[in-house]
Image: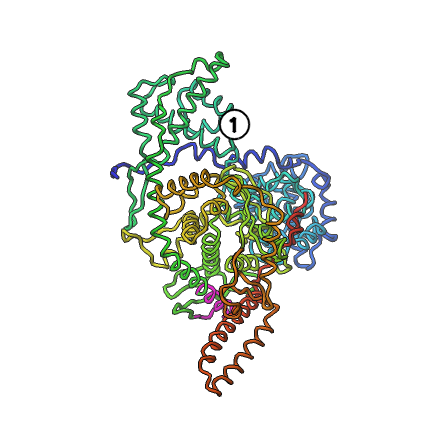
Amino acid sequence: MTTILTAPAQAPAFAQRSRGQEAAALLLAFPPRLRARSWPRTEAAREAILEDLQRPPLQAAEPNTQDVRMIGARLLLAWLEAIPGSSWQQRWENSPASASYDGWQQHIQTWAATQGRKPSRGTLHSGLLALICADVIRPSLPWLARNTSRYLRPAIAITRDPQGFAQLEADVPAREYAVRTGSEALKIIAQIVIAYGGGIDDIVVGDLLNHHQLMSAHKQTSTLSAVRLAYTWLRGRGQFPSDAPATLAHLTVRTGQLSPAELIDRYDLRCQPVRDLLVDYLTERQPTLDYASLSGLAATLGNLFWADLERHHPGLDTLRLPSEVSDAWKRRIAVKTVRKRCPDGTVRTVTEPRKSAPTVKMLVRAFYLDIGQWALDEPERWGRWAARCPVSEADCAVKKMEAEQKAWSDNRTRERLPVLPVLVRTAERLLRETRARLEAIDAAPRGSTVTVHGETFTLPAGGHRADGKAGFVRDSSGTRRDLRSEERRAFYAWATIEILRHTGIRIEELQELSHHSIIRYKLPSTGEIVPLLQVAPSKTDKERLLLISPELADVLSAIVSRIRRPGGTIPLAPSYDSLEKTWNPPMPVLYQWPVSGENRPISANTIRKSLNETLEASGLIDASGQPLRFAPHDFRRIFITDAILNGLPPHIAQVIAGHDSINTTMGYAAIYPADAIEAHRAFIARRRQIRPIEEYRAVTSEEWDEFLAHFERRKLALGECGRAFGTDCIHEHSCVRCPVLIVSPTEQPRLEEIRDNLHDRIAEAEMNGWLGDVEGLQVSLAAAEEKIARLDARQARKESPVFLGIPTLDKLAARIIDSQEPTS
């Protein structure tokens, strides 16, 4: 690896141009309402307006407040009469005060001074509020957004749409609008009612989209959260159409699905004919590709291929590349320049091999071959671009790369598999400590000092939380810390480690786990109910079911209990497919948490950050002495390796992992060398040739009956025998001592009776000096007590507050959950 002394690479311009295109497209699909220039109230006479202000609901409750409002309203109306316009609204828009909220009173005060008046700012504010409540004037949204008055929203709720605001507060949980973001969301709704007229029920998607774009342009992040929460409230009421966006979160950075032309234009290609060719090629391939593949193909052909050629060979306008040009491109594409952070915190620019180089060359080769094939069918369209392919089949060879990848993967797995228990213990410890800290500050009064696990925290004297608990605290060094966020990250780091190590699923499958994924299945032979985890299709579009072990059930139950609302429902959270650039419908996903009143899925970056924090706390290091890093995919390799190491057949591991080929599964396993795999396959092939064909015949009904009868013979008074099919008892029917005895929870009283009887028999044997019997009876007693302890632990887990509630199979089929689906 060679260090390059160059300036840091700047972000490409196309990345900035494509940001926010999804919001622009949504504004075209959902435009805001047009603001009216005239309506009955704004055309009313001055005397009629003043009379309305002295009648409910416009009349203030307190006489002094009403007097100030009337003084201010008369003064403002007199000032507006001197401005040209056919209505009060037109006069307001023509006045200098409507341009900006900052300093708007100065224009009226300057005019009032010529009339011998000196009104205060408070009087003018009260008068303007009265005229706004009476719907005489409607300031613009930018003007209203700068208004920080705490009287605006309550006044609008009383005077403009009391029923609408009352119904909204009834529909929204009190915990959401009692906090600061909820109060700001109600204020946003009041501002839209003011600016566009009508009531809450008249608000459309475009009104909030427009407000969101306005706040984004002014970088008012706190107000953006309020706009998003207001949108979530109104959408949850079924006020918006079904095709409206599920949420406004991250809307300003989303690109949405771009057309082939937009995908290519991100790279600023100078040769227009080649640019048009690439657009046509992508358009031709688009019906057979998903969006992620289409975007990747555009990046390869537009950026890594042609844009690179234009940078190094200006003026190039043909696909017929000289050998020296194509050879130089292959050398450049074999490496890439990246920025790496050093242990001392500095950043350096280095070159390293590009692992995807064979894939890039393969796509370029396919591009040339496609053009050559299409030129035979449509010479008038593609014929002029047909050329000799500069990438040979040998250039696309990946055997060496796959061998290197396999060696790297095996080494990574062997390095991490032995230290996995340390990581598990660290995650459990961090979760206990963060919970202890959080419980301590929640129990302490405001302004006090708390010491937990050797750390001292000072609680603030005040706060904005509706539950009265502290949001942020300061430690002994004065650092401001969010202990709730620390506890959340510790919990999901622990949950992630447990789920990934017990299932081996991918990170995108982890994020898509929902309450629907937990199902139960009744075995047809024994009638036993077993829990299953349904993994949604992801990379290979294959759905699969995994058996939920008791350890995994504890983790899933803890997550379900954490996200479940007080009424027992699971919140619905919309998720964004970062590959397809589309929104998924709201689902009761398990990986979600509330952010500014919205339930949002936990991002992959947050999951990785939580894992890194746990790894840092573990103190694990790699062979080079650097801090050890775990990627979510490492747990998948460890799961497959550990499963095969413990005797799971590779073809079963393939099904559990969801791989199309067993070669992929064996590529994950770090314990099977290539020659062993090939020898085993050859052995199977030879054995099938030698063995008689009768061994591969279909199972007869008599054989199947014998198989079922085996399980009937396994039934015992204390439960069931777990011996394998076709085997007899090898423990002389000493069931209490036998390790394969599966005790039924309903037979615990019988087992306790046996235990008590063993105590009596041991006492009798000791009294009579039967020492041989004492030794044998004590072995049976130890086995009985161990089995009783297991049953007690299992029952305690079921009765704990985090016991998993598994939806029944019929609920799964109907896809019914406790949460109320949003209506359209």
Instruction: Tell me if residue 649 is in the magenta stretch.
Output: no
Q: Position of residue 187 (x, y in %)?
A: 60, 50
Q: Position of residue 608 (x, y in %)?
A: 43, 50
Residue 128 shows in this picture: no
User: On the image, which quarter does residue 466 sit in?
Assistant: bottom right
Residue 392 shows in this picture: yes
In the picture, which quadrant includes the C terminus? top right
Q: Residue at x 47, y 14 (%)?
A: 376
User: On the image, which quarter does residue 698 sit in?
Assistant: top right
Q: Position of residue 153 (x, y in %)?
A: 63, 52
Q: Which amino acid, by three-letter code, is at mark 1?
A: Gln
Identity of the residue furthest to the top in this view: 380
Q: Nearer the viewer, residue 574 or 286?
A: 286
Q: Residue at x 32, y 32 (%)?
A: 334
User: On the image, which quarter does residue 16 sit in?
Assistant: top left
Q: Is residue 16 above or below residue 246?
A: above
Q: Few, some or many C-alpha atoms within 10 Å of disc 1 (few <14, some 14-19, many ≥20)?
A: some
Q: Is residue 797 above or below residue 510?
A: below
**Left-right relation of 702 to 360:** right
Q: Secondary structure at mark 1?
A: helix
In the picture, which quadrant includes the N terminus? top left
Q: Nearer the viewer, residue 786 or 209?
A: 786
Query: Residue under circle 1?
Result: 286
**Left-right relation of 247 to 48:** left
Q: Position of residue 403 (x, y in %)?
A: 34, 38
Q: Nearer the viewer, residue 347 or 794?
A: 794
Q: Is residue 496 above or below residue 83?
A: below
Q: Main secondary structure of the magenta part?
A: helix
The residue range painted magenta reads 433-450
Q: How is the image coloured?
A: rainbow
